[in-house]
Image: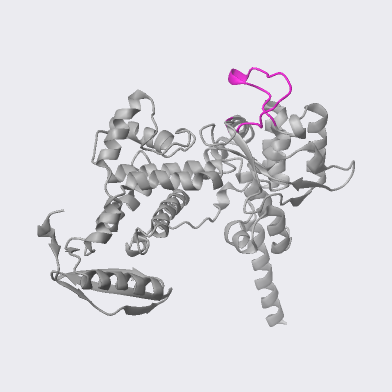
Amino acid sequence: MSTDNLSYDVRIWKIDTYAGKRGKTYTVRWAVAGKRSQQTFAHIKLADSFRSKLTTAAREGVPFDIATGLPQTMLRQLSRRTWYEHAAEFVDVKWPHASPRHRKNISEALAAVTIALLPSRTADEMQQIRSVLRNWSFNKAARGGSAVLDATPQDKDAVRLRWIADNSPDLSKLREAPVMRRALDALALKLDGKSAAPATVTRKRSAFYSAMEYAVELELFEANPIDKVQWTKPENTDIVDRRVVANPSQARSLLRAVREIYPALEAFFGCLYFAGLRPSEAKHLSVSGCKLPEDGWGELLLTGSTQHAGTDWTDSGEASEDRSLKHRPDKATRPVPACPELVELLRRHIDEFRPGPGGRLFVSRTGKAGIPLPPPYSNPVSSNTYARVWNKAREKALSEAQAASPLAKRPYDLRHAAVSLWLNAGVPATQVAEWAGHSVNVLLKVYAKCLDGQDEVARRRVEAALKEDLAERAA
């Protein structure tokens, strides 16, 4: 570092306290050679600690960097670590405790940030760099647990990795608002440059924020530098589009179409519609978890979920991995009622189709090109298979206009239809939340939607009430 960028002319002010809508914040302000700097903290102890470090450095005659406002000792500590090294280390720390899909999300988020912080290259080159970041640098399993700079990938990727390591900025650069804003903006875009879905942006920002919190934990930053950037992420309302919700008649037509196309999946989709299961929960369902009487209502005991993430992200090397129920501790269960129509579907499925190991109900029975597989059917049904069957069922069961609309566009939309049906039938929200595996707050925010075609019923009720009021006044 050039001595022209250093100065001993340091002035440090008292901590400023600001009481805003979200609570108090505490800002440390100081100047180096007349250039002002500031850091804002959520807690007074953090602000006081940071100010004390500045004061101590100034008293001990440590030169301050004019550009960043930091003492040379603090700047050297940050400069010893690049963003690339830090991101890879963060992946290794999170890997053992993260689900396969979470690992994949972290990798994608950190790859997007890294690309944004590197010098610009051609589109093809950046795509290759993104691939090696996602599948090697930010994948602990691919590196065999080795540190990112010690591992040896295939020769074709070695040159790219050296270029990434040589050109990655120091972690300290993320203190600068323009650099941080560039990283955040990258999270809001898809690979084609179009805006990403709000839920995707939220998920990626969360991973990036956690990586910067890890830097705070290592005492490389006094506070998360993301917090000082006034960056507004796309609003994620999570509200289900009412147009996706199928009514009972439409849902039954779709299930009949599935039976004609791929009979082994009729009960799978039936679980989503009649019991409100998530696809991952239906994939995990076993014979032992089904109480199916000959008459009346039955019950499904959910004990976990089977998530598809790809072989690169699971500990087993399989494409799918069994996990606990969403937002539930390990070994937690959730009972869900099975209406007589679903009981009949499941009883018929068990009679017609041999379950997989452990009694898993919905398993892959065909391989590539639709070639039947011999038992035992060891793999859970793949998302590609049931998505393909669902698309064909929509074309078969719906009108051309309905098929072109969002109506039941995804298998997951059957769950939305189930929860909407329960709510509109008058089932208390607390009971619906328990069946669906949600909090009441999330339920009312996300799933409280009307069934397709219920507007007219609601209007008639309002009209009847108004007429009744007029009749009472006339009398």
Q: In this view, does 200 lie to the left or right of 57?
A: right
At a point 14% along the width and 68% down the height, the residue shown is: 8
Counting labels gives 0
Q: Residue at x 49, y 47 (%)?
A: 94
* Location of residue 56 in the rendering, given as x and y in whole percent from the top left corner: 27, 71
Determine whether, in the image, residue 42 is placed left or right of residue 450. left
- Viewer-closest of 143 and 328: 143
Q: Which of 206 and 297 is in front in this view?
A: 206
In the rendered image, the quadrant that contains the C terminus is bottom right
- Give x and y (percent) for residue 472: 71, 80
Residue 142 percent coordinates (x, y): 46, 32
Residue 317 position by quadrant = top right
Residue 111 drawn above or below residue 258: below
Q: Is residue 160 magenta?
A: no
Assign the magenta stretch its main secondary structure. Answer: loop
Reply above or below: 432 against 390. Answer: below
The residue range painted magenta reads 363-384
Q: Say which residue appears at 59% left-offset and 20% top-offset.
A: 368
Residue located 69% across and 32% down the image: 265
376 in the magenta segment = yes
* Quadrant assignment, res 342: top right
Q: Is residue 86 left or right of residue 393?
A: left
